[in-house]
Image (cartoon, helix red, strand yellow):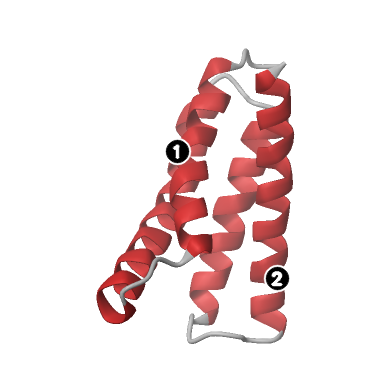
């Protein structure tokens, strides 16, 4: 039961992430370059695919897809903390959920 709920949370989370970066391409709202939004989109699409329909090597594909968003947002969270003394909640959420998604994909059987 908990894995079904967590799977739905991950799907919703990844769809929101995709939406944020689509909007970021269409209407920039930060200093993040266009190429970074594109890499995020490709990464989140790969992760979403692996959560929805995990292939045999889904955990590996998910991990590859999760690396860039994880590193980007971990750096963002650290920068916010060291510069302003507070944590960026969105960045912390990405840093926590992206590795957790790897566990979710790895625990499911392919197909």
Give coordinates of residue 107: x percent, y percent.
54, 16
Marks 2 and 1: which is nearer the front? 1
Q: Nearer the viewer, residue 44 or 89?
A: 89
Residue 108: % across, % down: 61, 16
Q: Is residue 27 above or below residue 53?
A: below
- Measured Cα–Cα span from mark 2 to mark 1: 23 Å
The disc, 2 or 1, on the residue closer to the chain's N-terminal end is 2
Q: x and y percent of residue 95 in the render?
A: 43, 50
Element under label 2? helix
Mark 1, secondary structure of its residue: helix
Residue 91 at least partly seen: yes
Which quarter of the figure is the N terminus placed in? top right
Q: Which residue in the protein does label 1 denote?
A: 99
Q: Residue furthest top?
A: 109
Residue at left offset 57%, top offset 19% = 56
Q: Which residue is mark 2?
A: 22
At x 70%, y 39%, the residue is 9
Can you give x and y, in whole percent of width and height, for residue 86 in the image? 37, 71
């Amino acid at each position: 039961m908990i894995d079904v709920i967590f799977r739905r949370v991950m799907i919703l989370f990844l769809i929101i992430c995709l939406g944020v970066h689509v909007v970021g391409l269409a209407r920039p709202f930060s200093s993040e370059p266009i190429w970074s939004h594109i890499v995020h989109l490709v990464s989140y699409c790969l992760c979403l695919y692996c959560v929805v329909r995990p292939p045999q090597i889904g955990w590996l594909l998910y991990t590859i897809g999760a690396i860039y968003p994880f590193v980007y947002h971990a750096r963002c969270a650290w920068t916010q903390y060291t510069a302003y003394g507070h944590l960026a909640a969105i960045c912390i959420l990405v840093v926590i959920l992206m590795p957790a998604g790897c566990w979710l994909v790895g625990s499911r059987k392919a197909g």
